[in-house]
Amino acid sequence: MKIALWLTNELKNIGLGNLKFNLEMTDKFISEYDHETNTVYISEYVDSVVGKIGRFMGGRPNDVKHSYRHEIGHAFLNSIWDVTSHKRFIETFGDVDQDYNEYGIYRSVLLQHDNNYVSKYAQTHPEEDFAEVFAEYMEASGCVYEEDSPEVEKKKDYIEYLIKKYGS
Ligand SMILES: [Zn+2]
């Protein structure tokens, strides 16, 4: 599977070659991550017009690879879940126990973009914020929007710290 190979290389490049997760295709419109089974589901529409509309509706950057990286961000956070109760995590991303709106991805398109976040979707929940910043961190090209705000830089620094601490 080409995606699996690409992801393995990307993860090695950032120092997370040890991250374990399952990878499956799904016929849902958007890619997603399942905590229970540690599975990254890649939408089979991800590269299609439907996939593009889905990403637009989700207020995500319109790049297929961004979706993959985002879901890997969830897998990484899940693998180090204890950090979500650490002071630095809560100060940086917030409380993961806050309500999760499963339709947040579609509603986020209506939000005004707040510079303290890398994307509109990141604004919907601390876990999505983490996944979005992680996706941006993985991109060698850097920021999704024109320039990162100091708040976003802080989030990236923390993710870099976590990768160095828990990765290999
Ligand atoms: Zn997500």
Image (cartoon, rainbow, N blue to C red):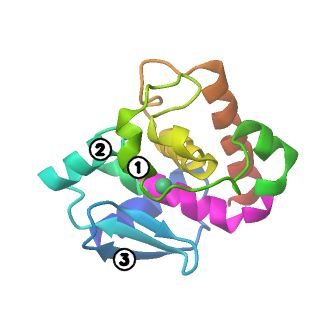
> In the rendered image, is residue 48 in sight?
no
Picture disc at residue 105: 1
Tell me if 49 is positioned left or right of 38 in this view: left
Dot 2 amino acid type: Met
Dot 3 amino acid type: Glu
Position in image of residue 149 (x %, y %) = 58, 19
For the record, the magenta segment spans 69-83
Residue furthest toward the right? 87
Whether label 3 touches label 1, CB < 8 Å: no
* Residue located 64% across and 65% down the image: 78
Above or below: residue 78 compared with residue 117:
below
Picture disc at residue 24: 3
Whether label 1 touches label 2, CB < 8 Å: yes
**Which callout, 1 or 2, points at the residue further toward the start of the chain?**
2
69 or 112, nearer to the observer = 112
* Residue located 46% across and 28% down the image: 143
- The N terminus, quarter of image: bottom left
Query: Dot 1: within a 10 Å radius of its alpha carbon, few (fewer than 14), some, or many (20 or more) residues?
Result: many
Position in image of residue 3 (x %, y %) = 32, 65
Above or below: residue 10 compared with residue 139:
below
Residue 112 covered by magenta stretch: no
